[in-house]
Image: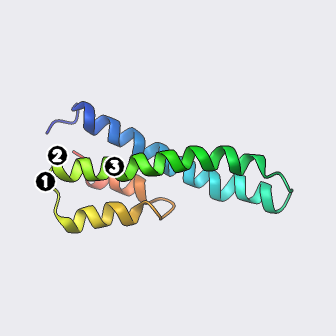
């Protein structure tokens, strides 16, 4: 697989955006909600993050099939989706 493969590029972008949305949710939207009582940002960022999270999991499975990842790598990719910087690691380590 080449680095210029469209599906790999798409998963790379989804991975990066999912990680950014998670960090925004954790470190900006949640403090705004619980410290300054501004819950609207959690609704907006949370919805975007939820969509990106689902796309990330679907894309991870897609890459599992496309790149012939082992089940262990697929598990790591899925586990990284719940770690704040996990998708950045996946994008760097497991994509060509």
- Left or right, residue 32 beside residue 11: right
* Residue 7 vertical position relative to residue 56 in the rendered view, above or below: above
| Residue lying farthest to the right in this orientation | 36
Instruction: Name the mark on residue 58.
Output: 3
Q: Quadrant of residue 34?
A: bottom right
Q: Quadrant of residue 69?
A: bottom left
What SS does tag 3 mark?
helix
> Which percent across, then down, holds residue 29?
71, 52
Work out which quarter of the rendered image holds the C terminus and state it. Answer: top left
Q: Which residue is mark 2?
A: 66
Please report the residue visible at 78 percent of the width from the left and 52 percent of the height from the top. 39
> Which percent across, then down, holds residue 63?
23, 48
Q: Which residue is mark 1?
A: 68
Work out which quarter of the rendered image holds the N terminus and state it. Answer: top left
Q: Residues within 10 Å of mark 3 (few under 14, many from 20)?
A: some
What separation in Å lies between label 2 and label 1 (alpha carbons)?
6 Å
> Which percent across, then down, holds residue 82?
47, 64
Q: Quadrant of residue 80?
A: bottom left
Tell which circle, 2 or 3, labels the residue nearer the N-terminal end. 3
Please report the residue visible at 31 percent of the width from the left and 66 percent of the height from the top. 76
- Left or right, residue 14 beside residue 36: left
Tell which circle, 1 or 3, labels the residue nearer the N-terminal end. 3
- Marks 2 and 1 in Cβ contact (< 8 Å): yes
Q: Residues within 10 Å of mark 1 (few under 14, many from 20)?
A: few
Please report the residue visible at 79 percent of the width from the left and 57 percent of the height from the top. 33
């Amino acid at each position: 697989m080449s680095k210029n493969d469209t599906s790999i590029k798409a998963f790379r972008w989804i991975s990066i955006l999912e990680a950014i949305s998670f960090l925004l949710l954790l470190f900006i939207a949640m403090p705004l909600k619980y410290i300054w009582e501004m819950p609207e940002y959690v609704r907006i960022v949370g919805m975007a993050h939820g969509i990106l999270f689902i796309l990330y999991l679907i894309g991870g499975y897609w890459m599992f099939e496309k790149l012939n990842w082992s089940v262990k790598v697929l598990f790591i990719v899925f586990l990284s989706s719940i770690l704040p910087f996990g998708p950045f690691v996946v994008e760097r380590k497991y994509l060509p």
